[in-house]
Image (cartoon, rainbow, N blue to C red):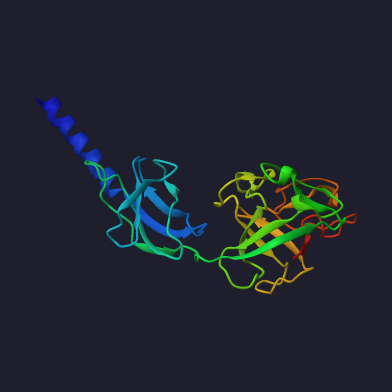
Amino acid sequence: MITSKLLFVVLLGTASIAHAGTQYTTQPASNITTTTAQLNGYSASTIGLSGEIIDYGETTNYGFSVLVTPAGVNGPVSAQVANLECGTQYHFRFHGDPKPPRSTLQGEDLTFTTLPCNPTILNNISLETGGQYYLVAENNGGDTVNANRLAIGPWEQFNLIDINGGDLLSGDEIHIQTTSGYYFVAEQGGGAALNANRTAASIWETFTIELPNNPGALIQNGDNIALKSINGYYVQAVNNGGFGTNVLPTVIGCNAMYPCSLEMFKIIF
Protein backbone atom coordinates (compact mmCIF):
# COMPACT_ATOMS: atom_id res chain seq x y z
CA MET A 1 0.00 0.00 0.00
CA ILE A 2 2.84 2.41 0.80
CA THR A 3 4.44 1.65 -2.56
CA SER A 4 1.17 2.41 -4.40
CA LYS A 5 0.78 5.76 -2.66
CA LEU A 6 4.36 6.68 -3.46
CA LEU A 7 3.87 5.78 -7.14
CA PHE A 8 0.72 7.92 -7.26
CA VAL A 9 2.58 10.91 -5.85
CA VAL A 10 5.41 10.53 -8.37
CA LEU A 11 3.02 10.31 -11.34
CA LEU A 12 0.97 13.26 -10.12
CA GLY A 13 4.13 15.32 -9.73
CA THR A 14 5.24 14.54 -13.28
CA ALA A 15 1.90 15.63 -14.75
CA SER A 16 2.10 18.87 -12.81
CA ILE A 17 5.60 19.61 -14.12
CA ALA A 18 4.51 18.95 -17.70
CA HIS A 19 1.69 21.47 -17.38
CA ALA A 20 3.45 24.16 -15.38
CA GLY A 21 6.80 23.86 -17.18
CA THR A 22 5.55 24.51 -20.71
CA GLN A 23 4.82 27.86 -22.32
CA TYR A 24 3.62 28.42 -25.87
CA THR A 25 4.33 31.61 -27.79
CA THR A 26 2.73 32.35 -31.15
CA GLN A 27 5.21 34.08 -33.45
CA PRO A 28 4.58 36.07 -36.67
CA ALA A 29 3.85 34.17 -39.86
CA SER A 30 6.46 34.16 -42.64
CA ASN A 31 6.91 33.15 -46.29
CA ILE A 32 3.42 34.40 -47.10
CA THR A 33 2.18 34.05 -50.68
CA THR A 34 -1.28 34.31 -52.24
CA THR A 35 -2.25 30.82 -51.05
CA THR A 36 0.43 29.57 -48.62
CA ALA A 37 2.14 30.62 -45.40
CA GLN A 38 4.50 29.38 -42.72
CA LEU A 39 3.01 29.61 -39.22
CA ASN A 40 5.53 29.90 -36.40
CA GLY A 41 5.68 29.37 -32.66
CA TYR A 42 8.09 28.88 -29.78
CA SER A 43 7.81 26.11 -27.21
CA ALA A 44 9.55 26.79 -23.88
CA SER A 45 9.29 23.38 -22.27
CA THR A 46 11.14 21.60 -19.48
CA ILE A 47 10.19 18.28 -21.11
CA GLY A 48 9.44 17.30 -24.69
CA LEU A 49 5.73 17.28 -25.53
CA SER A 50 4.52 15.93 -28.85
CA GLY A 51 1.16 16.73 -30.39
CA GLU A 52 1.58 20.51 -30.34
CA ILE A 53 -0.58 22.23 -32.95
CA ILE A 54 -1.36 25.56 -34.57
CA ASP A 55 -4.99 26.48 -35.11
CA TYR A 56 -5.80 28.81 -38.01
CA GLY A 57 -8.79 30.22 -39.82
CA GLU A 58 -10.52 33.41 -40.92
CA THR A 59 -11.93 34.09 -37.42
CA THR A 60 -10.91 33.35 -33.84
CA ASN A 61 -13.06 30.24 -34.09
CA TYR A 62 -10.22 29.00 -36.36
CA GLY A 63 -11.60 25.78 -37.85
CA PHE A 64 -8.32 24.25 -39.05
CA SER A 65 -5.39 22.74 -37.16
CA VAL A 66 -1.95 21.51 -38.20
CA LEU A 67 0.81 19.72 -36.30
CA VAL A 68 4.06 21.64 -35.85
CA THR A 69 7.55 20.41 -36.64
CA PRO A 70 9.87 19.51 -35.10
CA ALA A 71 7.73 17.77 -32.48
CA GLY A 72 8.48 17.83 -28.77
CA VAL A 73 11.29 20.39 -28.79
CA ASN A 74 12.27 23.26 -26.56
CA GLY A 75 12.64 25.97 -29.20
CA PRO A 76 11.17 27.31 -32.46
CA VAL A 77 8.59 25.28 -34.37
CA SER A 78 6.59 25.87 -37.54
CA ALA A 79 3.91 24.48 -39.82
CA GLN A 80 3.29 25.01 -43.54
CA VAL A 81 -0.30 25.70 -44.59
CA ALA A 82 -1.69 25.80 -48.12
CA ASN A 83 -4.95 26.24 -50.03
CA LEU A 84 -5.54 29.65 -48.46
CA GLU A 85 -7.65 32.36 -50.05
CA CYS A 86 -5.71 35.22 -51.63
CA GLY A 87 -6.01 38.70 -50.13
CA THR A 88 -7.54 37.31 -46.92
CA GLN A 89 -6.75 37.87 -43.24
CA TYR A 90 -6.21 34.74 -41.13
CA HIS A 91 -6.00 34.23 -37.36
CA PHE A 92 -3.70 31.62 -35.82
CA ARG A 93 -2.43 30.47 -32.41
CA PHE A 94 0.06 27.90 -31.13
CA HIS A 95 -0.85 25.56 -28.28
CA GLY A 96 -0.34 22.15 -26.72
CA ASP A 97 -1.95 18.83 -27.45
CA PRO A 98 -5.62 19.28 -26.46
CA LYS A 99 -6.04 15.63 -25.45
CA PRO A 100 -5.87 15.03 -21.66
CA PRO A 101 -3.61 14.90 -19.74
CA ARG A 102 -1.59 17.18 -22.01
CA SER A 103 -1.15 20.90 -21.40
CA THR A 104 -4.03 23.16 -22.39
CA LEU A 105 -1.85 26.28 -22.33
CA GLN A 106 -1.87 28.29 -25.55
CA GLY A 107 -0.17 31.23 -27.19
CA GLU A 108 -1.82 34.48 -28.15
CA ASP A 109 -3.84 35.02 -31.32
CA LEU A 110 -1.97 36.63 -34.22
CA THR A 111 -3.01 37.47 -37.76
CA PHE A 112 -1.49 37.54 -41.24
CA THR A 113 -2.89 38.46 -44.65
CA THR A 114 -2.21 36.52 -47.83
CA LEU A 115 -0.98 38.44 -50.85
CA PRO A 116 -3.43 40.10 -53.25
CA CYS A 117 -5.35 38.09 -55.81
CA ASN A 118 -4.38 40.10 -58.89
CA PRO A 119 -0.67 39.89 -59.64
CA THR A 120 0.94 41.83 -62.48
CA ILE A 121 2.18 39.57 -65.29
CA LEU A 122 4.97 40.66 -67.64
CA ASN A 123 4.98 38.36 -70.65
CA ASN A 124 7.98 37.27 -72.71
CA ILE A 125 10.78 38.65 -70.56
CA SER A 126 14.35 37.40 -70.99
CA LEU A 127 17.36 37.37 -68.65
CA GLU A 128 20.86 38.00 -69.99
CA THR A 129 24.08 37.29 -68.11
CA GLY A 130 27.03 39.67 -67.96
CA GLY A 131 28.75 37.39 -70.49
CA GLN A 132 25.86 37.98 -72.93
CA TYR A 133 24.32 34.53 -72.62
CA TYR A 134 20.59 34.06 -72.02
CA LEU A 135 18.89 31.91 -69.42
CA VAL A 136 17.08 28.98 -71.02
CA ALA A 137 14.50 26.57 -69.64
CA GLU A 138 15.55 23.41 -71.43
CA ASN A 139 12.71 21.87 -73.44
CA ASN A 140 10.66 24.96 -72.55
CA GLY A 141 10.22 23.58 -69.03
CA GLY A 142 10.11 20.29 -67.19
CA ASP A 143 13.90 20.29 -67.06
CA THR A 144 16.87 22.30 -65.80
CA VAL A 145 17.74 25.99 -66.35
CA ASN A 146 20.99 26.82 -68.13
CA ALA A 147 22.72 30.07 -69.10
CA ASN A 148 24.26 29.10 -72.42
CA ARG A 149 22.17 30.54 -75.25
CA LEU A 150 23.41 33.35 -77.51
CA ALA A 151 20.01 34.34 -78.89
CA ILE A 152 16.43 34.65 -77.63
CA GLY A 153 13.92 32.04 -78.76
CA PRO A 154 10.77 30.58 -77.18
CA TRP A 155 12.74 28.66 -74.53
CA GLU A 156 14.52 31.88 -73.46
CA GLN A 157 11.29 33.84 -72.91
CA PHE A 158 9.35 33.73 -69.65
CA ASN A 159 6.37 35.19 -67.85
CA LEU A 160 7.30 37.21 -64.78
CA ILE A 161 4.51 37.23 -62.19
CA ASP A 162 4.74 40.15 -59.74
CA ILE A 163 2.83 38.65 -56.82
CA ASN A 164 1.68 41.84 -55.09
CA GLY A 165 0.54 43.53 -58.31
CA GLY A 166 1.19 47.09 -59.43
CA ASP A 167 4.57 48.26 -60.73
CA LEU A 168 7.55 45.92 -60.65
CA LEU A 169 9.73 47.27 -57.84
CA SER A 170 13.02 46.23 -56.31
CA GLY A 171 12.13 43.98 -53.38
CA ASP A 172 8.95 42.53 -54.92
CA GLU A 173 8.37 38.79 -54.69
CA ILE A 174 7.89 37.13 -58.07
CA HIS A 175 7.40 33.82 -59.86
CA ILE A 176 9.05 33.06 -63.20
CA GLN A 177 7.09 30.79 -65.52
CA THR A 178 7.98 29.27 -68.87
CA THR A 179 5.61 29.83 -71.77
CA SER A 180 4.57 26.18 -71.42
CA GLY A 181 3.50 26.70 -67.80
CA TYR A 182 6.43 25.42 -65.69
CA TYR A 183 7.79 27.49 -62.80
CA PHE A 184 11.40 28.21 -61.92
CA VAL A 185 12.24 26.53 -58.61
CA ALA A 186 15.18 26.99 -56.26
CA GLU A 187 15.47 23.42 -55.01
CA GLN A 188 15.32 23.22 -51.20
CA GLY A 189 14.47 26.92 -51.21
CA GLY A 190 18.07 27.69 -52.23
CA GLY A 191 21.52 26.24 -51.73
CA ALA A 192 21.03 23.80 -54.60
CA ALA A 193 19.98 23.65 -58.26
CA LEU A 194 17.76 25.93 -60.33
CA ASN A 195 15.15 24.05 -62.34
CA ALA A 196 12.02 24.88 -64.33
CA ASN A 197 9.96 21.78 -63.66
CA ARG A 198 7.14 22.71 -61.28
CA THR A 199 3.53 23.01 -62.39
CA ALA A 200 2.42 25.05 -59.35
CA ALA A 201 4.06 27.89 -57.44
CA SER A 202 4.75 27.86 -53.70
CA ILE A 203 7.61 29.11 -51.53
CA TRP A 204 10.48 27.39 -53.39
CA GLU A 205 9.14 28.91 -56.61
CA THR A 206 9.15 32.41 -55.09
CA PHE A 207 12.04 34.83 -55.68
CA THR A 208 12.75 38.40 -54.63
CA ILE A 209 13.80 40.62 -57.53
CA GLU A 210 16.41 43.20 -56.48
CA LEU A 211 18.17 46.25 -57.77
CA PRO A 212 21.13 46.00 -55.38
CA ASN A 213 21.39 48.97 -53.01
CA ASN A 214 18.19 50.46 -54.42
CA PRO A 215 15.20 48.90 -52.62
CA GLY A 216 11.79 50.07 -53.74
CA ALA A 217 13.03 51.47 -57.05
CA LEU A 218 11.07 50.91 -60.25
CA ILE A 219 12.57 48.12 -62.38
CA GLN A 220 12.73 49.01 -66.05
CA ASN A 221 13.73 47.34 -69.30
CA GLY A 222 17.50 46.86 -69.44
CA ASP A 223 18.10 47.09 -65.67
CA ASN A 224 20.58 44.71 -64.06
CA ILE A 225 18.76 42.73 -61.39
CA ALA A 226 19.42 39.88 -58.96
CA LEU A 227 17.08 37.05 -57.99
CA LYS A 228 17.05 35.88 -54.36
CA SER A 229 15.39 32.65 -53.23
CA ILE A 230 13.03 32.39 -50.28
CA ASN A 231 15.91 31.23 -48.05
CA GLY A 232 18.29 34.02 -49.07
CA TYR A 233 20.35 32.41 -51.84
CA TYR A 234 21.01 34.12 -55.18
CA VAL A 235 20.59 32.71 -58.68
CA GLN A 236 23.99 32.46 -60.34
CA ALA A 237 25.15 31.91 -63.93
CA VAL A 238 28.23 29.70 -63.68
CA ASN A 239 31.28 31.48 -65.17
CA ASN A 240 29.02 34.39 -66.11
CA GLY A 241 27.27 32.28 -68.73
CA GLY A 242 28.01 29.56 -71.24
CA PHE A 243 27.30 26.85 -68.67
CA GLY A 244 24.63 25.99 -66.12
CA THR A 245 23.05 27.83 -63.22
CA ASN A 246 22.64 27.31 -59.50
CA VAL A 247 21.17 28.99 -56.43
CA LEU A 248 24.21 28.76 -54.16
CA PRO A 249 25.61 32.22 -53.25
CA THR A 250 24.28 34.04 -50.22
CA VAL A 251 25.75 37.36 -51.36
CA ILE A 252 26.22 39.11 -54.70
CA GLY A 253 29.90 38.39 -55.15
CA CYS A 254 32.62 40.42 -56.83
CA ASN A 255 35.95 39.23 -58.18
CA ALA A 256 38.60 40.36 -60.64
CA MET A 257 37.39 38.26 -63.57
CA TYR A 258 33.63 38.82 -63.18
CA PRO A 259 33.12 42.02 -61.17
CA CYS A 260 29.80 41.67 -59.34
CA SER A 261 28.14 40.00 -62.31
CA LEU A 262 27.68 36.26 -61.74
CA GLU A 263 24.47 36.93 -59.82
CA MET A 264 23.33 39.86 -61.99
CA PHE A 265 21.08 39.61 -65.04
CA LYS A 266 19.87 42.18 -67.52
CA ILE A 267 16.08 42.00 -67.65
CA ILE A 268 14.63 42.48 -71.13
CA PHE A 269 10.90 43.18 -71.45
Where, by quadrant of the figure, is residue 222 drawn? bottom right
- Where does residue 217 sit, x and y in percent of width and height? 68, 74
In-image side of 72 versus 16 (left or right): right
9 relative to 27, above or below:
above
Extreme-left residue of the structure: 1
230 relative to 187, above or below:
below
86 relative to 68, above or below:
below
Q: Quadrant of the N terminus?
A: top left
What residue is shown at x 23% (from left), y 44% (from top)? 16
Q: Nearer the viewer, residue 9 or 249?
A: 249
- Where does residue 152 sit, x and y in percent of width and height? 81, 55
- Where does residue 70 sit, x and y in percent of width and height? 44, 42
In-image side of 28 versus 118 (left or right): left
Q: Nearer the viewer, residue 242 or 72?
A: 242
What residue is shown at x 28% (from left), y 52% (from top)? 105
What residue is shown at x 77% (from left), y 56% (from top)? 263
In-image side of 232 versus 56 (left or right): right
- Where does residue 143 sit, x and y in percent of width and height? 69, 41
What residue is shown at x 68% (from left), y 62% (from top)? 123
74 relative to 260, above or below:
above
Where, by quadrant of the figure, is residue 9 drawn? top left
Q: Quadrant of the C terminus?
A: bottom right
